[in-house]
Image: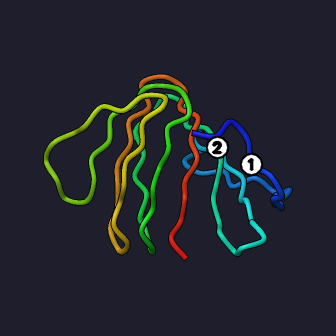
Amino acid sequence: MSQQFEHVSIDKHANIYFDGSVISYNLRFADHARKTIGVILPSTVKFATDVPEIVEIVSGKCRVRIGSADEWHSHEGGQRFQVPGQSSFEIEAIEPVHYVCHFSN
């Protein structure tokens, strides 16, 4: 996993969700790729997806449940998980989770 992004535009206005438990920023690349980068404070939150997403955990520990699955899977820094489009995922941040979300174009 890369430690930085090159040649990127960043929206100045933060995305703040779930009463401040999740804060992220939109990144836009010259090739039209779009990502968000942010942090999830200890909490359990649920996101809906429009397009397929890859969520890269930069640091922290969490548990994830994708779609209507019953089981939770543990993830930590250096790992990633995929979520289909038109689905959802729940994430329980056990400690602050720094992440990058990669969206399919």
Q: Looking at the image, which is closer to me, 43 or 91?
A: 91
Q: Which residue is mark 2?
A: 38
Q: Amino acid at mark 2?
A: Gly
Quadrant in which the N terminus appears: top right
Q: Quadrant of residue 76?
A: top left
Q: Residue furthest left?
A: 70
- At label 2, counting other C-alpha atoms closer than 10 Å, the crowd grade (few under 14, some 14-19, many 20 or more) is some
Taking 19 as reference, is 95 left or right?
left
Q: Looking at the image, which is closer to me, 57 or 90?
A: 57
First of labels 2, 1 by sequence position: 1
Q: Residue at x 44, y 32 (%)?
A: 93
Q: Position of residue 24 (x, y in %)?
A: 67, 49
Q: Residue at x 71, y 73 (%)?
A: 31
Q: CA distance from mark 2 to mark 1?
A: 14 Å
Q: Residue at x 75, y 66 (%)?
A: 29
Callout 2 touching callout 1 (CB < 8 Å): no
In this rendering, the label closer to the viewer, 2 or 1: 1
Q: Amino acid at mark 1?
A: Phe
**Element type where label 1 sits in the image:** loop
**Element type where label 2 sits in the image:** strand
Q: Residue at x 71, y 59 (%)?
A: 26
Disc number placed over residue 5 in the picture, else none:
1
Quadrant in which the C terminus appears: bottom right
Compared to residue 16, the image places residue 9 above or below, namely below
Compared to residue 52, the image places residue 10 above or below, namely above
Taking 84 as reference, is 96 left or right?
right
Q: Looking at the image, which is closer to me, 7 or 42?
A: 7
